[in-house]
Structure formats: structure tokens, C-alpha cells
């Protein structure tokens, strides 16, 4: 967990008052002190679980007696829920910083529940994005006061949720609104995915990477489906106004790039390249056969770009995610080839698979070899089921399938092991 002295140490290093060796010695000393005097992981797990159970118990108790409580009593309970956890965190902050962070996190969760419960108590005008805005503001204020990674993570999730909510309410039923959301969230996911680079590997950045890795796949599919829906709209459907379009795209593209500059500094130019990729992805029409093929090739190229991005910045999770999405892209390409009976695409996928294997060998990346072999096996399997099995009888097709799995699997595994072993010998 980041300490308050970390920002001061970083400022002194940037000002040239401390050389890198002195900074490393200070961090090593503080880490040894924390190990000697700090709290063991079983206690942290117990405190985290206790915080979750405490919050759940309070909410269940209030929910069970909600109808019996007057509006004034309900409001008092809401204030108490929010205040007691933050006060408790402030009390124990000096001696148990980890426990304080957990209590403040529960307080921020209680703030969100309190905001929406207050709206229900007083029958306020329904505008649910406003509740998300106040919740996100509370998380930002808590982060500004404490600099806890938990509060920053809450803010990183709640802020885009609020913006999406406001946009959904303002543009309900308008053509093109979904594309703005999809492309903005996809670019933000890539920004989170790139939060870790070189020496910047603190806990918050690693959590943002995991959040981005999960969200990038979901947001990519959402962007593709949103693009398909926008092409299906009738020609007389009301579209976004000029002001809505300019404002929407400015936030959808500008906010993630601003976050990238905050997280990565001058290296954010690579996120600008990612923004171009996202915009082209949103322009392709999945309802058109040719454009669908181009879209799938574009996704495969984007996956390889993520792999190379991860290799260049020495980030293994980004490499693994890129290889996983590359395998998925190959699956969709082969599905398109099966539907269109296009032998050239099978050849393209086979050559691409070999290219990934060659890259894995030259870059000494066993995961590249594994992914390339998996893509090649997928290509052979799709080709057999699409072009071969229909031309054989039932028994011959089953025999051929068995031979394909047994002999082909043995050959692929043998080749894979030799290539990986060659990499390991070269590393010794």
C-alpha cells in the first residue's frame, strides 16, 4: 500500500536531490521495517473479511427493520452508516493503517448506499446518474485526503459509470449513442491495461491492469455490437445533434487519453495509437460480409499490437491478454472462412500461426510458441470439419478425425516441446 512518504521521495528524486541508488536504499529500509513491524497477511485477510461482513450485517439489519423506522430515523441511520466507518478509520489510522483503509473503504460503500436510500426516503426527483456522481465525488475526496489505493480504485470505476449514466439518460433512443459509449469504454479499458509500465508497478496500477484486462474484451464486443446496431437503425431515426456528437466524442476520446497522460506521462502517445485503432473498429459494419472479415483481421492485428506493446514495456499480463485475444480472433476468422468456404483465409490463418511461433522463438517467449501452436491446431481443426469431413463417409470421417487428433496432436506437442526446450537452453 502506498505510504505518504512515497510521493515525497518521488518528488525529491525528480528534483535531483536523491540519486536512484539512495532511493532504492530508502525503499529497501522501509520495506524491511514494514516486514519487521507490519501486519501479516492472515490479519489483513481477516480484517478485509470482517469489513465485508460488517457492512453486510449492517445493511441486512437495516433492511429487516426498514418499514418500522420513521423517515427521520432512516435518515439518521444513513448518516450513521457513512460516518461511523470513516470515524473508525480515522481513529485507528495512526497505529493500523491497513485497518483504517478497510474501514474507509466500507464507509465509501456505505456512502453509495446512503445516497440512493436518501433519495428513496425523501422521494427526490429520479435521476440515478446524479447519485453515481455524488458517490464518485465522495471516492475522489476520500482519495484526496488519504491517498488510499482502494479509494482510487472506487473512483476509477464510479467516474466512468457516472459519465455513461448521464450519456444514456441524455441520448436515450438516439442513433449513434451506443457507439460513443462503446468506443469510450474500450479506450478507457486499454488505458487501464497500460497503467503498469517499466518501473511504475504499484498496487493500484496492477489493480487497474486487471480491471482493464477484464473490461477490454467485454468492451470490444460491446463496441462491435453497438456498431452493428447503429447500421441497423432506420434511416429516419433521430440521430445525435451536432452539440451532442461533439461533446460525446470529446469526452469518450479525451477523458481516457487524459487519464493515460496522468498515468503514463509522455508515453501516452501509444494510447493515442490505440485510440485510432478503436475508432477504426467502430467504423466497420459487422452486418456486411466483407467488412466483417476486415473487422476480424483488424482485431487480430490489434491483439498482436497489444502483445508487442507488452513485450516492449516488459509487462507479462499484457502479452498474455494479447495472445488470448489473438486466439479468439483466429477463431472468428476461421468461423468466417467456414461460412464463406474461403480456402485463402485458412491459408492466411495457417501462415499467421507459423508467424506467431517464429516470433515466439526469435523473442524467446514460450507463451508465443504455445499460442501459435494453438492457433495452428485450431486452423487445422476448422479446415477438417469444413472442407474434409463432408467429403468422406461416416466411418472414414471418424477414423480421419481420430488420426488427426492422435497423430496431429503428437506432432504439434513434439514440435512445441522442442522449440520451448531450445529457448530454455539458449537462456542458460
Image (cartoon, rainbow, N blue to C red):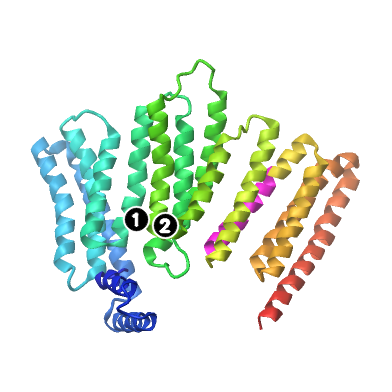
> Can you say which quadrant of the picture contains the C terminus?
bottom right
* Residue 402 image point, x, y percent: 83, 54
Residue 54 in sight? no
Give the number of the disc on residue 378: none
> Can you say which quadrant of the picture contains the N terminus?
bottom left
Quarter-of-image position of residue 242: top left
Q: Is residue 244 above or below residue 46?
A: above
Quarter-of-image position of residue 148: bottom left
What residue does disc 1 label?
Answer: 153
Main secondary structure type of the part rendered in magenta? helix
Q: In percent of the image, x 48 and y 54: which residue is there?
A: 269
* Residue 3 image point, x, y percent: 27, 70
Of all residues, the one furthest to the top in this rendering is 236
- Callout 2: helix, strand or loop? helix
Mark nearer the N terminus (1 vs 2):
1
Front-lying residue, 380 or 227: 227
Residue 21 in sight? yes
Q: Is residue 213 left or right of residue 342?
A: left
Of all residues, the one furthest to the left in this rendering is 72
Determine if the magenta segment contains residue 56.
no
Quarter-of-image position of residue 251: top left
Front-lying residue, 386 or 402: 386
Query: Within 10 angstroms of label 1, few (less than 14), some, or many (20 or more) residues?
Result: some
Q: Confirm or deny contact between disc 1 and disc 2 (CB under 8 A).
A: yes
Front-lying residue, 333 or 201: 201
- Callout 1: helix, strand or loop? helix
Q: In percent of the image, x 47 and y 64: which residue is there?
A: 197
Front-lying residue, 173 or 283: 283
Which stretch appears magenta? 317-332
Determine if the magenta segment contains residue 325.
yes
* Residue 382 image point, x, y percent: 77, 46
Give the number of the disc on residue 208: 2
Amino acid at each position: 500500500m502506498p505510504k505518504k512518504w512515497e510521493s515525497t521521495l518521488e518528488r525529491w528524486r525528480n528534483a535531483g536531490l536523491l540519486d536512484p541508488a539512495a532511493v532504492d536504499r530508502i525503499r529497501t529500509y522501509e520495506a524491511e521495517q514494514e516486514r519487521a513491524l507490519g501486519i501479516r497477511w492472515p490479519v489483513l485477510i481477516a480484517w478485509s473479511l470482517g469489513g465485508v461482513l460488517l457492512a453486510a450485517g449492517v445493511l441486512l439489519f437495516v433492511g429487516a427493520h426498514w418499514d418500522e423506522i420513521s423517515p427521520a430515523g432512516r435518515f439518521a441511520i444513513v448518516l450513521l452508516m457513512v460516518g461511523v466507518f470513516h470515524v473508525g478509520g480515522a481513529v485507528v489510522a495512526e497505529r493500523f493503517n491497513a485497518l483504517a483503509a478497510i474501514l474507509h473503504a466500507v464507509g465509501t460503500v456505505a456512502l453509495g448506499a446512503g445516497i440512493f436510500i436518501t433519495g428513496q426516503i425523501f422521494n427526490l426527483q429520479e435521476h440515478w446518474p446524479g447519485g453515481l456522481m455524488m458517490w464518485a465525488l465522495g471516492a475522489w475526496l476520500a482519495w484526496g485526503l488519504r491517498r488510499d489505493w482502494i479509494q482510487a480504485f472506487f473512483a476509477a470505476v464510479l467516474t466512468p459509470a457516472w459519465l455513461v449514466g448521464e450519456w444514456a439518460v441524455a441520448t436515450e433512443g438516439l442513433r449513434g449513442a451506443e457507439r460513443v459509449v462503446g468506443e469510450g469504454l474500450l479506450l478507457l479499458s486499454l488505458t487501464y491495461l497500460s497503467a503498469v509500465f517499466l518501473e511504475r508497478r504499484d498496487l493500484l496500477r496492477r489493480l487497474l491492469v486487471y480491471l482493464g484486462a477484464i473490461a477490454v474484451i467485454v468492451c470490444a464486443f460491446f463496441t462491435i455490437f453497438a456498431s452493428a446496431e447503429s447500421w441497423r437503425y432506420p434511416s429516419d431515426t433521430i440521430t445525435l445533434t451536432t452539440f451532442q456528437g461533439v461533446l460525446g466524442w470529446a469526452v469518450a476520446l479525451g477523458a481516457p487519453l487524459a487519464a493515460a497522460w496522468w498515468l503514463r506521462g509522455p508515453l501516452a502517445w501509444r494510447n493515442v495509437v490505440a485510440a485510432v485503432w478503436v475508432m477504426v473498429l467502430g467504423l466497420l459494419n459487422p452486418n456486411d460480409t466483407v467488412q466483417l472479415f476486415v473487422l476480424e483481421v483488424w482485431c487480430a492485428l490489434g491483439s498482436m499490437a497489444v502483445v508487442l506493446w507488452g513485450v516492449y514495456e516488459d509487462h507479462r499480463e499484457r502479452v498474455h491478454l494479447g495472445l488470448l485475444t489473438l486466439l479468439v480472433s483466429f477463431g472468428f476468422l476461421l468461423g468466417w472462412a467456414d461460412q464463406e468456404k474461403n480456402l485463402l483465409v485458412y491459408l492466411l490463418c495457417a501462415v499467421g500461426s507459423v508467424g506467431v511461433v517464429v516470433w515466439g522463438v526469435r523473442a524467446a517467449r514460450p507463451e508465443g510458441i504455445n499460442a501459435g501452436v494453438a492457433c495452428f491446431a485450431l486452423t487445422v481443426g476448422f479446415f477438417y470439419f469444413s472442407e474434409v469431413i463432408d467429403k468422406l463417409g461416416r466411418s472414414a470421417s471418424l477414423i480421419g478425425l481420430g488420426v488427426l487428433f492422435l497423430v496431429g496432436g503428437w506432432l504439434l506437442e513434439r514440435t512445441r516441446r522442442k522449440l520451448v526446450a531450445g529457448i530454455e537452453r539458449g537462456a542458460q
